[in-house]
Amino acid sequence: MKKNSFYVKVIKRLLDIIISLMTLMILSPVILLLMVTGLIALSGNPFFTQDRPGKNEKIFKLIKFRTMSNKKDSDGNLLPDEQRMNGYGRFLRATSLDELPEFLNILKGDMSLVGPRPLLVQYIPRYNEFQHHRHDVLPGLTGHAQVNGRNALSWDEKFALDIWYVENVSFIIDLKIVLKTFTTVFSHKGVHSETSVSMEEFMGNGPEKEEK
């Protein structure tokens, strides 16, 4: 990545600011509509915020549109994801419209348009040394793993794609990923894993694995 440090630090950041500002302005009517619809469809706050690790594993607040209700069982525990996601939530996931508020994260500098997706904070101690390198760059709204399988990939496949991106980031690669993102979103490929509406929890995979 060192050979492209000027692109990452200057050009990529400038593009992130311009694109996120333009997107938020142009899609502001859509964002407002989703806010109101989410408030009604999910009976409450339409936004979902959560701590996520960014570059160098610095924690930030990720913001998305909520796709699941907060319905609980008789013991006060949240119901399984499948039971808390209604048609509205599935629509947001399938179209990736739930990601729109993340342009605020991009504008703030927490994220970039392209980069490894920000995962859960509790995964950090489960990574091996190789996997930690996914945090050498800003996390992204879309990324190399997202356009090559998304949630249908195994964790090992995701991490391999993430690290490849970190080691090869460039304007051309970012452009290809952005263009491929549109195809991926419209085809709805990889929105869910094979066994769940969301990706299964990453539990770690033991000693570091050498990448060839």
Image (cartoon, helix red, strand yellow):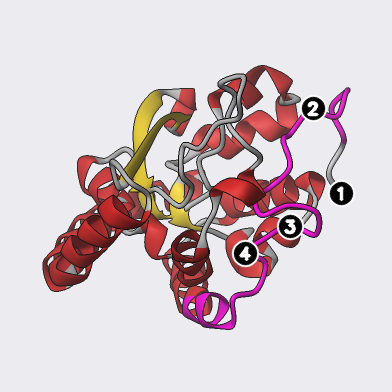
Q: Which residues are magenta?
A: 182-209
> Could you say whether the residue bearing mark 4 is in a helix, strand or loop?
loop
Give me the residue at 46% from left, 44% from top.
69
The overriding secondary structure of the stretch rendered in magenta is: loop
**Residue of label 4:** 191
Q: Is residue 2 above or below residue 86?
A: above
2 or 3: tag closer to the N-terminus: 3
Mark 2 against mark 3, which lies toward the viewer?
A: 3
**Residue of label 1:** 212
- Cβ atoms at labels 4 and 1 below 8 Å apart: no
Amino acid under label 4? Val
4 or 2: tag closer to the N-terminus: 4
**Residue of label 2:** 204
Mark 2 closeness class: few <14, some 14–19, many ≥20 residues within 10 Å:
some
> Could you say whether the residue bearing mark 1 is in a helix, strand or loop?
loop
Mark 4 against mark 1, which lies toward the viewer?
A: 4
Q: Is residue 126 magenta?
A: no
Amino acid under label 1? Lys
Whole-percent x, y for residue 74 in the image: 60, 25
Give me the residue at 27% from left, 61% from top.
37
Label 4 and label 1: CA atoms lie apart by 28 Å
Mark 4 closeness class: few <14, some 14–19, many ≥20 residues within 10 Å:
many
Front-most of 168 and 119?
Answer: 119
Whole-percent x, y for residue 169 in the image: 51, 56
Front-most of 167 and 74?
Answer: 74
**Residue of label 3:** 193
Label 3 and label 4: CA atoms lie apart by 7 Å
